[in-house]
């Protein structure tokens, strides 16, 4: 085998995913995209927001189950599991992830596209439960949002395969638990709350009271040293000094560690490497950005020339064709 093609957040852009796989040299055989010398690693967030969610899940799942791909869990797959799982008896809530207007909005496209396929949706949720939270194989590391060595050791001590069981899922919705800290860091990354009364009005229509931070600055001093999202911080907050408490919230991934691949952070523009050993592959596909892959062939120092992408066309939202699901 020559290597892996790592693919960032698809978010229901199923037709573009098929086109990207073809561009990478994968072709359908027996209803599964295959390559004679390479395999895919999906970085999670197959679902939500996009127009062809069932197609995206079908393509990825068939590849994984046929041994043509691996996958790690994204926060959106996790959210779907918690949203659809009843809370334990005696709890003060009905669902592990409460059905608030914001949570309803995030998952509404997924539920709508599976509405007439309830058995398929239940089967998809069961498959989500088998997806690991991180991967380490053949010299690379893969996680949806943030590789935190301490928390990953804790996860491996509980679950050597890095998969959640039902107990872990239930525990992960309680902010006071170890499972919550592991799940939150690995699938959502680190973030810093904004001052009271200040919010970010994001381009995706949500209002946020915190901002996402990266984890490769060795000695950050200001908020601007760690901010990692396309929305600018309000006012002059980029020059605001990090407090000791805020520094404690951050992770650090040093340049001596193995190549790491992440998604999650909806970057914009031409794909670029933040460091020589980290590649982010989420380039806002569902917002008509780019669906991005990195072709890794064993190199310890990553190379921006190895990015491959397709600009997501407006036609991605045209009416779904039956052959796009039943393509075998």
Image (cartoon, rainbow, N blue to C red):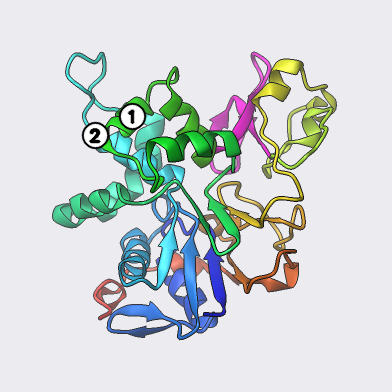
Q: Quick check: 138 left or right of 56?
A: right
Instruction: Find out whether residue 78 is within the magenta segment.
Output: no
Is residue 210 located in the magenta-colored stretch of the structure? yes
Closest to the observer, 277 or 200: 277
Residue 102 visible to an observer of this rendering: yes
Q: Which residue is mark 2?
A: 85
Q: Residue at (52%, 48%) from the top-left corner? A: 144
- Distance from the alpha carbon under mark 1 to that under mark 2: 8 Å
Q: Are marks 1 and 2 in contact (CB under 8 Å)?
A: yes
Q: Residue at x 59, y 24 (%)?
A: 209
Label number found at residue 193: none
Outermost residue toward the left?
119
Tell me the tag on residue 97.
1
- Element at badge 1? loop
Q: Secondary structure at mark 2?
A: loop
Figure quadrant of residue 146: top right
What residue is shown at x 34% (from left), y 26% (from top)? Answer: 171
């Amino acid at each position: 085998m020559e290597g892996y093609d790592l693919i960032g957040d698809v978010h229901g852009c199923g037709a573009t995913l098929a086109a990207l796989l073809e561009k990478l040299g994968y072709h359908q055989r027996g209803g599964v995209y295959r390559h004679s010398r390479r395999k895919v690693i999906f970085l999670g967030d197959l679902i939500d927001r996009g127009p062809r969610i069932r197609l995206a899940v079908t393509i990825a799942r068939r590849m994984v189950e046929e041994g043509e791909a691996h996958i790690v869990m994204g926060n959106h797959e996790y959210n779907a599991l918690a949203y659809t799982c009843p809370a334990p008896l005696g709890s003060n809530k009905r669902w592990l992830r409460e059905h608030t207007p914001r949570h309803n909005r995030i998952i509404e496209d997924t539920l709508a596209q599976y509405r007439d396929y309830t058995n398929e949706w239940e089967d998809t949720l069961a498959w989500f439960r088998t997806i690991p939270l991180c991967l380490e194989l053949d010299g690379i590391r893969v996680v949806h949002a943030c590789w935190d060595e301490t928390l990953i050791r804790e996860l491996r001590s509980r679950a050597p395969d890095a998969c959640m069981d039902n107990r872990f899922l239930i525990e992960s919705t309680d902010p006071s638990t170890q499972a919550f800290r592991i799940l939150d860091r690995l699938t959502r990354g680190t973030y810093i709350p904004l001052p009271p009364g200040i919010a970010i009005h994001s381009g995706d229509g949500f209002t946020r009271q915190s901002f996402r931070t990266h984890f490769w600055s060795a000695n950050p001093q200001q908020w601007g040293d760690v901010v990692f999202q396309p929305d600018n911080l309000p006012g002059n907050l980029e020059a605001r000094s990090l407090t000791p408490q805020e520094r404690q919230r951050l992770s650090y991934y040093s340049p001596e560690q193995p190549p790491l691949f992440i998604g999650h952070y909806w970057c914009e523009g031409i794909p670029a490497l933040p460091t020589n050993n980290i590649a982010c592959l989420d380039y806002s596909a569902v917002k008509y950005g780019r669906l991005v892959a990195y072709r890794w062939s064993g190199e310890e120092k990553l190379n921006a020339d190895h990015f491959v992408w397709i600009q997501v066309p407006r036609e991605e939202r045209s009416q779904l064709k039956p052959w796009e699901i039943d393509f075998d």
